[in-house]
Amino acid sequence: MAALCLVLLAPLTVADVPPLLDYPNHLARLFVLAADGSDPVLARFFQPRWAVIPNLALDLTVPPAIAWLGVHTAGRLAIGIVLLLPVAGAVAYHRVLSGRWSYWPFAAVLFVYNGALLRGFLNFSAATGLALLFAAAWAVWRERWPLLAIAIGALGGAILFFCHLMGLLFFVLLIAGHELAWLWRAKGQFSPQILGARLALNCQVLALPAMLYMRSELGQMPGEPVFRSLPEKLNAALFPVVEYCWALDVATAVLCVAAAGLCLARRWCAVPLAAGAALGALGLLFLAAPHAFKGTFDLDARFIVMAAALAPAALIPVRVPRRVAALLFVGFLVLFGARMGVVLTVWSRWAGDLAAFREVIAFVPEGAIAMTVRTPMTPGPSPKTWLADARTLSDGTATDTHLPALLTIERRAWWPFLFDNPSQQPIAVPPPYNLLAERTDAMSDPIGWLVGGAPDAALYTHLLVLGEISGPALSGLLSGPRKLTRVAGNGTASLFAVAPLATR
């Protein structure tokens, strides 16, 4: 397990800002929170706004570490913990279900680098592992020391609430599976009073999270669900294996499902009722859940990611033939090695793109107010047929959109797209910058709005274009009513200084 975990962590040594879609944006917020108002430049642009928010795992743990370790080391340390939690949870939960240690749950490492993690859903990924760990504790102690189990469950429920609500739901499903298994084993041996008392005790796990949710802005927030089409739903089913090589991702999914199906069909393995019920519920929720609801995206895909984290723990070997076990072990090592080799290769290339981007933003002065835009990606081979680069996942998702957040971290500058949703993040943007951010976000042509001399864009001092810009597009920028001067640029990004609006 130690060897596998070291391999999982190896990509974090390649680049100090890993290519996880939302990660730079989250890291910028954590950097601001670590300053805690002591930096006068950052205090102009951002203010802490603490409240009851079910999404605070990073915000509560990383800012104190930044003061000791520095922003990029603390960020990668957090990512490393997030990577290992699902593996530890699978091993612990499998140990409880089977009653013995086994190599079988190590298959969980195949699904650590998945579509959710590579999109930067770090709180969710951490909550998935924590839910398995808390469920393992519940299953061990629920019958032997009920009050201790209830106390741990209540504590775990509160922690998972502040980590991510999807992790709390996962924990509830695992508990429900355990209770269903207890009910099946004890059928006819208890009275309705005993069942009612047990149910009342179990509900204590949700008492505090329910009260916290009702007090949160998310609980009061209206939401309109957005559902996927059937082809989109089928594509989302590959979320647990999405990396950078479409063929390898599909092969991973097919081989893992085939291996599990063969072992179950030949009765070499079994799935206990407690885990089987949770897996079934996760599958149904994946099919029924919307894609987006209350500001959370890829909601349905997260259920299939949780199912993939649970499956290696749920599959209990019974009498696997030695040759079959050896074949499965060799196949696992080859598949895991191939997937990690792809991640290391792609992230190594990303280090070069990151260095080129930093060369450009090095010319941004402290306290600048920068509009950031991304040019359309250059058409090329479909990521579903070729090895993608770090800026694109195998399903076509662009992962460098939030890279301009490094302006706040490394240049102490303002940019308009920091995550500051009051129902999800404990940070606020004061006037007039909040109004400028809303105006910029609403623009279909933000560059045209800026160079056209609009008075409400007068605060901007710089324009950062992510991606290559040249030819007629560049000439159009430099000849607009509001003068732009190109300061720096390469194939990764271009920086322009914006002249002040002319006054009468």
Image (cartoon, helix red, strand yellow):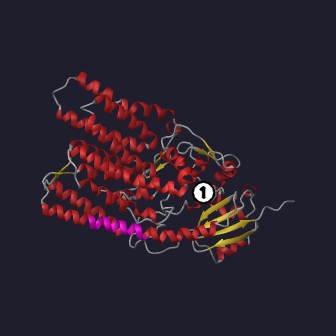
Observer able to see residue 51 = yes
Q: Amino acid at mark 1?
A: Ile
| Vertical relation: 206 (above or below) 49 | above
At label 1, counting other C-alpha atoms closer than 10 Å, the crowd grade (few under 14, some 14-19, many 20 or more) is many
Say if 400 sits above or below 66 in the image. Answer: below
Q: Position of residue 107 (x, y in %)?
A: 28, 57
Horizontally, residue 405 falls left or right of residue 293, namely right
Specify the quadrant that holds the N terminus: bottom left
Camera-nearest residue between 427 and 1:
1
Disc 1 is placed on an element classified as helix
Figure check: 8 above or below 128: below
Q: Please identify the residue farthest to the top as the structure is shown.
A: 193
Q: Would you identify the image quadrant in which residue 426 lies?
A: top right
Residue at 49% in and 59% down? 21
* Residue bounds of the magenta highlight: 333-345
- Position of the C terminus by quadrant: bottom right
Identity of the residue drawn at 28% across and 44% down: 278
The image quarter in which residue 150 lies = top left
Query: In the image, is 466 to the left or to the right of 154?
Result: right
List the residue tagged with mark 1: 409
Closer-to-camera residue (339/480) = 339
Query: Does the magenta segment cover residue 343?
Result: yes
Residue 186 located left or right of residue 435: left
Tell me where residue 240 appears, x and y as whole percent. Answer: 35, 57
Can residue 71 be found in the magenta stretch? no
Task: Specify the quadrant of the image occupied by residue 325.
Answer: bottom left
